[in-house]
Amino acid sequence: MQLCTANTIEDLASATRRRTPICSKRVGFSAAVGVLATLVASSYSAYRIRESEKDFNAIQRSQVKSAGQQLLSGVQRQLETSVSSTKALSALIHLDQAEKLLEPLSGLVHNLVNKSAVLSTLEDPTAEQKALAEQEKALAQQAVVANSSLFEFNTVAASLISTYKGISNLQLAPGGIVSAIYPLASNEGAVGHDLFYDPNRRQAAMETIRQGSVVFIGPVVLIQNRKRAIIARNPTFIDRGGFVGPVGEHPSWWGFATMLCTLDDLFEATPLARAEEYDMSYLLVAQTGNGKQFLSASGSVLRGAENIDKDDATWLAHVDKYDPVELSFVLPELRVHWVMKVWPREGWREHSDTFLLQVLLCSFFT
């Protein structure tokens, strides 16, 4: 057996002292590499989670935009379809020179139009003259209203409304005097309305005739029931008008074929009526020369803003807090520009379904 001498012991101690710093450096370097690798992995994982969430938000908005576009496209199609009913009605007027549609009340209609013309053309009348003209027109109006159920027009109008949908009523206005309305219920007050005698309607009526095509009006407040509605008037020209109106440069002008729909009736025939079934909230406004005008909103929006004036721009500020997606459509020929803001009924989701799982996995592996 070899005995350990003093020199041997000193040599071993010296060797141990030489190896210890080298081992410590190696361990420290490995630990630093491990920490750096962990930081890199954590940073990359956090980056991927952020990017994944960005993708989720983009996908979420894209899905809402797609759903909103379907809602708005349904509105556009129905609006165009409802308005086109006036072209069909005008074609029928032109086809039989309006003889059959007004039967058997053609004589009463002529009398109403004539009495309206007398009233509207009085120049500086005395109080007695004006009162007499108004009384005679009122009697003519009452006669038409009392017998309106006999109009041949009613059958045609019922068929058109059933086919085109989204329509509250159809009207005939020979000489610019509303004479036949279907359905008549709740609209009796509009019979005898002279579009040229009414300062709020005259300019639009004249423009319609001169333009020679359908003119879209509204939303307006109806004189007969105070509801908000849109109106499409199609000027009708036939070889022998028979009704003398105030537009002398168009002697073949007969009158107007008119479609009226309240906003409620129009939107009831569109996907908007079922928007909340798809967990969607929306605000629909009309872009006009005077700014944006309220058209419709989902029930959840209305319930959350009972005190907001529907004709006030504060509607837009109210819904902007939901960070909505904005969509629109334009119909230049009708001068229509409608804008929709849409968002999830329960609000935007902050995180995807996999967010928590991603965070846990990141924590586990790092």
Image (cartoon, rainbow, N blue to C red):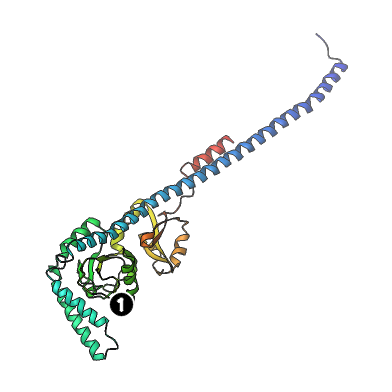
The residue at 52%/46% (across/down) is: 54
Q: Is residue 157 above or below residue 4?
A: below
Quarter occupied by residue 325: bottom left
Question: Could you say whether the residue bearing mark 1 is in a helix, strand or loop?
Answer: loop
Quadrant into which the N terminus falls = top right
Q: Position of residue 340 (x, y in %)?
A: 41, 58
Front one among 154 and 59: 154
Q: Residues within 10 Å of mark 1 (few under 14, many from 20)?
A: few
Please, which residue is most extreme toward the right here? 7
Q: Position of residue 289 (x, y in %)?
A: 43, 67
Q: Is residue 141 above or below residue 216?
A: below
Q: Which residue is mark 1?
A: 198
Q: Position of residue 84 (x, y in %)?
A: 28, 58
Q: Is residue 301 left or right of residue 17?
A: left
Quarter occupied by residue 187: bottom left
Please, which residue is most extreme toward the top here? 1
The residue at 14%/74% (across/down) is: 107
Front one among 48 and 144: 144
Front one among 249 and 221: 249
Front one among 196 and 326: 196
Number of callouts: 1
The residue at 79%/28% (across/down) is: 21
Quadrant into which the C terminus falls = top right
Q: Is residue 115 left or right of residue 363?
A: left
Q: Position of residue 292 (x, y in %)?
A: 43, 65
Q: Amino acid at mark 1?
A: Asp
Quarter occupied by residue 303: bottom left
